[in-house]
Image (cartoon, grey):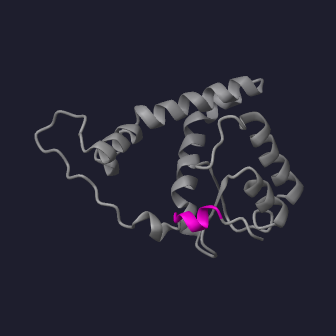
Amino acid sequence: SLEVDFVLDTVSRLIEEHGVSLHAETIIHSDQGCHYTSHSFIRILCDKKLRQSMSRRGNCWDNAPQESFFGHMKDHIKAKLNECTGFAGVQSIVDDYMDYYNNRRYQWHLAKLAPNEYYKFVTTGEYPLDIPHVPALPVAAKEPAELGASASKKDNCTL
């Protein structure tokens, strides 16, 4: 089980090691465990102007896509990880998998594109493959405001 101090230390390390690259659009996502709803955790995020995101209470489906991703990643890299002797090796294997997943792992439900290609397709409307029947541009099911991305919520750091 996670202790609040472990979570606070992890976020502090994130800020210490990546502070320069973190900005107000950085999202820290979690479930609604007591460590992520603690005043200390919320204060650290607010002080550094990071955005907090939580799954809905009692809704395990909110994290299902991410859990599925990590499950597939673990299956894919497990054998390579067993050969690692240090952090640098693990980091290299994870980085390679992330590059593969985002740039070369084509997915049927993403208009037969890799995630980065799909993002470009959605944002520009340009389909990158030369095929006879180009898929229709996807339509967002919800507007950003419906997902809690309003400016008033973004800057709200009251406890």
Any part of residue 68 in sight: yes
Quarter of the image with the N terminus is bottom right
In the image, residue 149 above or below residue 75: below
Please provide percent x and percent y for residue 88: 72, 23
Residue 52, image quadrant: bottom right
Describe residue 154's horizontal placement relative to residue 17 as left or right: left
Please provide percent x and percent y for residue 35: 80, 63
Describe residue 124's horizontal placement relative to residue 148 as left or right: left
Q: Let me know if residue 122 is in the magenta part.
A: no
Residue drawn where x is 34% and y is 40% of the image: 120
Any part of residue 83 in sight: no
Residue nearest the observer in this picture, 132 or 108:
132
Residue 128, image quadrant: top left
Residue nearest the observer in this picture, 28 or 66:
28
Q: How many marks?
A: 0
Please provide percent x and percent y for residue 149: 52, 63
Quarter of the image with the C terminus is bottom right
Describe residue 69's horizontal placement relative to residue 132 as left or right: right
Residue drawn where x is 55% and y is 27% of the image: 96
Write down the region rendered in magenta.
149-155
